[in-house]
Image (cartoon, rainbow, N blue to C red):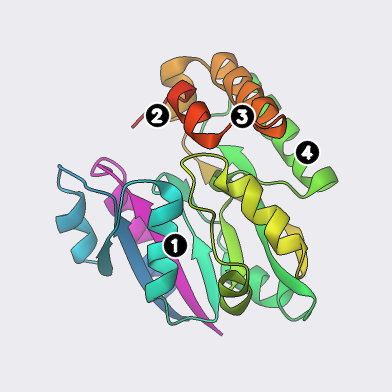
Amino acid sequence: MRFSIIVPVLNEEAVLEKLLVHLTKQCAHYDYELLIVDGGSTDNTISIAQRYGKVIHAARGRASQMNAGAANAQGDVLLFVHADTRLPHEAFIAIQQALLSTEVIGGAFRLCFNCERWPYRLVAFCTNLRSRISTIFTGDQTYFIRAGGFHAIGGYPDQPLMEDIEIIARLRKVGKVILLPLYVTTSARRHEKNGLFRTVLLMWYLRTLYKFGVSPSQLQRMYIDVR
């Protein structure tokens, strides 16, 4: 099983090298390729990325960047990793075991933050509970998807926000999506800068508006993008 690890980036020089070092060590005993998809960085992101994998240039936006990575991927499994997220030690073994079932088309990991304070643990708990009940995941939870299934559904929708919710709906039509019992660790930087509960409430508000038909373009104007 060959893994195509796709990392969408934009001005991530502060965290990118740590991620890529971590990934290359984890992947040492697996068949993999590392694709870093840049959306127009103006810092040292590209020069860092070139030392570890193939750099692809795409229009800014996670959906368009991840689709560009998938279009260049040669692997059997696509793994979409954010620059400030760390995979658990046994991530690749867990994915391989999950995909032994032919009905499984993809899934994600449980979430924890790199912050042990109780409010962050509470938010992670609620996120994981929702994922267990509804199999709806956030991008921070690191999606893994069979390449064939990804291309069959047309990849991520071309929209600036809520692409993660939309792709899960598409995947469910052609296979089963699962939540793995392992945890990815993601940075709390966005929550720390804007306030944990303010950020959480904003995302709940945006998801509710999306459910009731507000366009992703309108939602994007309300979204706070912190780097």
The answer for how far apart the CA atoms under marks 1 and 3 are is 23 Å
Left or right of 5 in this view: 44:
left
How far across and how far down the image is residue 75, in percent? 48, 81
**Circle 3 SS class:** loop
Q: Nearer the viewer, mark 1 or mark 3?
A: 3
Residue at which label 2 appears: 225
How far across and how far down the image is residue 212, in percent? 72, 29
- Where does the magenta region start and end? 1-22
How far across and how far down the image is residue 117, in percent? 59, 22
Q: Would you say residue 153 sits in the magenta stretch? A: no
Q: Nearer the viewer, residue 38 or 52?
A: 38
Quick one: label 3, few (<14), some, or many (20+) residues within 10 Å?
few
* Residue 41 to residue 177: above or below: above
The answer for how far apart the CA atoms under marks 2 and 4 are is 23 Å
The quadrant in which the C terminus is found is: top left
Q: Nearer the viewer, mark 2 or mark 1?
A: 1
The answer for how far apart the CA atoms under marks 2 and 1 are is 20 Å
The quadrant in which the N terminus is found is: bottom right
Residue at which label 3 appears: 214
Residue at which label 4 appears: 130
Disc 1 marks a residue whose amino acid type is: Asn
Residue at which label 1 appears: 67
